[in-house]
Amino acid sequence: MESKPPLPPFSEETARQKVRMAEDAWNSRDPARVVQVYTPDTLWRNRAEFPQGRDAVKAFLERKWARELDYRLIKELWAFAGNRLAVRFAYEWHDDSGDWYRSYGNENWEFDDNGLMRRRYASINDLPIAQEQRLFHWPLGRRPDDHPGLSELGL
């Protein structure tokens, strides 16, 4: 049986750790890596898409990162209880025309006893921004530890 610590029930410390681990995985933009933190039968809602299972989530992420270029994400814990986390996030990206966006959202996560996410419900809004309005300037990949989070950036 797969296990992805930290395991529920979450404390504030382990909830924050789980959120940062998810942020790091998503910033890798590697669908094969990202899907390993979800149950094989995971259920998602992401905007108007409802992928079910790792294969569908992997295909979704491949399409997402082919469209959302130079993607950089920050996640922040909002609330936690037992095996559930509420997370807010923002990410910046541009399309193939060079138009920049900052996407804002909230996610509700539910984990199984092994620390794998079995449910992910996301609501997301996109804000067109000028390149000069970008706030996420680290090199592609993991956000540096000294880079401000959402609250510090006033987002």
Image: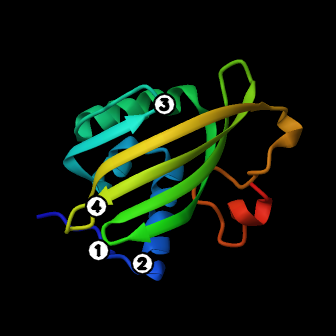
The image quarter in which residue 53 lies = top left
* Tag 1 and tag 2, C-beta contact below 8 Å: yes
Q: Earlier in the sequence, mark 3 or mark 2?
A: 2
Q: Could you say where residue 119 lies in the image, as x and y percent from the top left?
A: 30, 49
Q: Relative to residue 96, is residue 61 drawn left or right?
A: left
Q: Could you tell me which residue is drawn at 66 percent across and 21 percent down?
A: 96
Q: Amino acid at mark 3?
A: Lys
Q: Residues within 10 Å of mark 1 (few under 14, many from 20)?
A: some
Q: Amino acid at mark 4?
A: Phe
Q: Is residue 137 visible?
A: yes
Marker disc for residue 64: 3
Disc 2, SS? helix
Question: What residue is shown with label 2?
Answer: 14
The image quarter in which residue 32 lies = top left
Q: Residues within 10 Å of mark 4 (few under 14, many from 20)?
A: many
Front-most of 97 and 73?
73
Q: Is residue 148 visible?
A: no
Question: What residue is shown with label 4?
Answer: 111
* Disc 1 to disc 3, C-alpha distance: 28 Å
* Tag 4 and tag 3, C-beta contact below 8 Å: no
Question: What residue is shown with label 1?
Answer: 7
* Disc 3 to disc 2, C-alpha distance: 28 Å
Q: Earlier in the sequence, mark 1 or mark 4?
A: 1
* Disc 1 to disc 2, C-alpha distance: 8 Å
